[in-house]
């Protein structure tokens, strides 16, 4: 009997039960059911799009639209519950009652009063006068955040405090976390498809909209204002939490600045100088194609052409940002320059989503899905862009400033970019022995061939699909359902970088450069690693950082956004974000240092 118990104990001790270990990769029956239910939810969205295209109707005019939308996302939420199932799902224990001090409790109470006012408007209560209630709700939430932040971090010793995150119902997929996820998901569904149900909330923001724009608010003004408010004030909370880490302070100030100035106030100012007859085009100078897929919309191109010099500047800047600035900066410092310093999606993930970064799945199946999904989205956005621009440039010459784009010049540029990218991928496949890259080569050559065929056959349908249908599919499925509802609504359920990790085409585009042609890497000092697992636990991209640290290998991953949290939470200074020569980026540590001694890494 004793021998059997000892045998079981030894086997248990030899098994890696950590968040990134062998046991964590296993899928239970509930996990598999969860994946299936989530897939059914996605199929529901696809069915809706298919019926809309075949029936040639608007998405919201499709029969049973409400039921399909709500049913599909409900299946995804239930699937997430089963995929991430643990007993803590039924926990309602929170830091509020057991581990908070009086200052934190006061901050939470003040913040909840402000949030309650905003929620009342969300639920349909007309709050008058709107100016008073708007500033009262926002002001109370801001004061509540500051008070709670002071109570949480003031007077504490240096170091990052993630105490009790797995015992807090809100941050560990407990009952409070699921309620928050369901509420966020419902809000995003309303914003995208049922904005009329938000009328009371929208009217609450009218005074502020008239002040900034001279017109009444709409759902996008409300969304942008709340989005910016959250990044600003939770960004300040983030700075206090990581106040002993200079890198975290500087990059958080950066994302707050770019959201507040470039994404929010500056577009309003520039819009005032735009001719009302020119039409609308995006004026967020940091929004890059392919993330900004609206850049290639025909109405935006027409508006830029009518606007003259300023329109030409936005057009040229948009192209240069994608073709020159992004590859160059990613080569120098990795994709972190955008994902962790500039991007609004990343800014929200780092500030509002900081409490949920430990929820990112470290399972092997998640990593496999990540690679296939994000690169499929990249192919999708390329297909949509080529398909929609071809008929636009075949109808007439596009004149903007001193530039004229003809059908022939578009053909040459498109084929040239496809073939140059195909050659680059071919060399990368040979150099790094990644034959999967050859699939990208085939796709790019196929795109180039189809564009050439469309030119000589005078066919406006490059891929034999109506370009408007392709744009409708991408905008609904990727731009709204994925980036919005799942990307943010599922923060408390699947972690704060679901969109960035699985769906963002910009992240995928930069990831290729970071993986195969960049100076950026995270270096490791394996001899100092104590295998505590903090780095892997708090990696929002689901990378098993500890496995690299234990072997003393550099971390060169396409998905890494360079947030630096792994380095910040390491108690031994094992990890360091560096930019250095390309040579040796992938070389492992020649020595393996363990408690048993030093051996050669062969």
Image (spheres, rainbow, N blue to C red):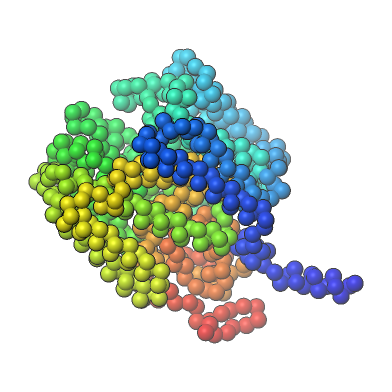
- Picture coordinates of residue 312 (x, y %)? 16, 43
Residue depicted at x 50% and y 73%: 553
Name the residue furthest left: 402
Residue 163 seen in the figure: no
Residue 397 appears left or right of 170: left
Is residue 527 depicted above or below 285 in this figure?
below
- Picture coordinates of residue 260 (x, y %)? 37, 38
Residue 261 appears left or right of 237: left
Q: Quadrant of residue 226?
A: top left
Is residue 120 depicted above or below 296 in this figure?
above
Name the residue furthest right: 1
- Picture coordinates of residue 236 (x, y %)? 48, 41
Q: Nearer the viewer, residue 284 or 377?
A: 377
Q: Nearer the viewer, residue 16 or 465?
A: 465
Residue depicted at x 20% and y 59%: 452
Residue depicted at x 41% and y 51%: 504
Q: Nearer the viewer, residue 282 or 485?
A: 485
Where does the N terminus fall, quadrant-wise? Answer: bottom right
Name the residue furthest top: 128
Residue depicted at x 46% and y 32%: 63
């Amino acid at each position: 009997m004793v021998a059997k118990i000892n045998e079981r104990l030894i086997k248990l001790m030899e098994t890696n039960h950590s968040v990134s270990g062998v046991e964590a990769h296993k899928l239970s029956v509930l996990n598999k059911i969860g994946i299936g239910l989530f897939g059914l939810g996605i199929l529901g969205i696809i069915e809706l799009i298919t019926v809309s295209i075949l029936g040639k109707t608007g998405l919201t005019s499709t029969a049973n639209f409400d039921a399909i939308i709500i049913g599909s996302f409900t299946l995804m939420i239930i699937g997430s519950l089963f995929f991430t199932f643990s007993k803590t799902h039924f926990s309602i224990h929170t830091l509020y009652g057991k581990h908070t001090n009086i200052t934190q409790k006061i901050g939470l109470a003040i913040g909840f009063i402000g949030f309650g006012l905003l929620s009342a408007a969300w639920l349909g209560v007309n709050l008058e006068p709107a100016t008073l209630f708007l500033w009262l709700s926002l002001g109370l939430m801001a004061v509540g955040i500051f008070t709670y932040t002071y109570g949480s971090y003031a007077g504490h010793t240096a170091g990052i405090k993630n105490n009790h995150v797995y015992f807090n119902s809100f941050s560990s997929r407990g009952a409070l976390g699921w309620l928050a996820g369901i509420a966020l998901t419902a809000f995003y569904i309303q914003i995208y498809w049922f904005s009329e149900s938000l009328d009371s909330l929208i009217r609450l923001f009218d005074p502020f909209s008239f002040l900034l724009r001279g017109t009444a608010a709409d759902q996008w003004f409300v969304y942008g204002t709340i989005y910016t408010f959250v990044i600003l004030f939770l960004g300040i909370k983030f700075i206090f939490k990581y106040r002993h880490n200079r890198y975290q302070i500087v990059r958080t100030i950066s994302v707050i600045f770019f959201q507040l100035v470039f994404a929010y106030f500056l577009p309003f100012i520039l819009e005032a100088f735009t001719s009302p007859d020119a039409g609308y085009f995006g004026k967020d100078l940091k929004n890059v194609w392919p993330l900004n897929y609206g850049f290639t919309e025909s109405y935006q191109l027409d508006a830029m052409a009518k606007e003259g010099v300023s329109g030409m500047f936005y057009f040229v800047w948009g192209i240069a940002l994608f073709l020159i600035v992004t590859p160059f900066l990613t080569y120098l410092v990795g994709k972190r320059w955008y994902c962790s310093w500039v991007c609004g999606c990343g800014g929200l993930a780092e500030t509002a989503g900081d409490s949920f970064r430990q929820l990112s799945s470290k399972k092997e199946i998640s990593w496999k899905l990540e690679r296939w999904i994000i690169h499929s989205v990249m192919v999708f956005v390329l297909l949509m862009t080529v398909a929609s621009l071809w008929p636009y440039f075949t109808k007439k010459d596009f004149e903007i400033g001193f530039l004229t784009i003809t059908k022939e010049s578009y053909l040459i540029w498109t084929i040239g970019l496809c073939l140059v990218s195909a050659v680059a991928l071919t060399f990368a496949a040979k150099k790094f022995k990644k034959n999967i890259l050859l699939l990208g080569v085939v796709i790019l050559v196929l795109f180039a061939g189809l564009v050439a065929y469309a030119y000589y056959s005078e066919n406006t349908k490059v891929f034999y699909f109506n370009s408007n249908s392709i744009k409708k599919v991408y905008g609904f499925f990727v731009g709204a359902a994925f980036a919005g509802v799942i990307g943010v609504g599922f923060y408390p359920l699947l972690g704060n970088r679901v969109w960035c990790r699985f769906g963002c085409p910009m992240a995928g585009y930069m990831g290729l450069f970071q993986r195969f042609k960049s100076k950026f890497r995270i270096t490791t000092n394996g001899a100092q690693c104590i295998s505590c697992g903090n780095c892997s636990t708090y990696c929002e991209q689901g990378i098993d950082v500890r496995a690299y640290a234990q072997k003393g290998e550099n971390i060169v991953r396409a998905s890494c956004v360079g947030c630096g949290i792994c380095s910040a939470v390491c108690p031994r200074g094992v990890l360091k974000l560096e930019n250095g020569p390309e040579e040796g980026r992938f070389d492992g540590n020649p020595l393996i240092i363990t408690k048993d001694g030093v051996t050669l890494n062969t």
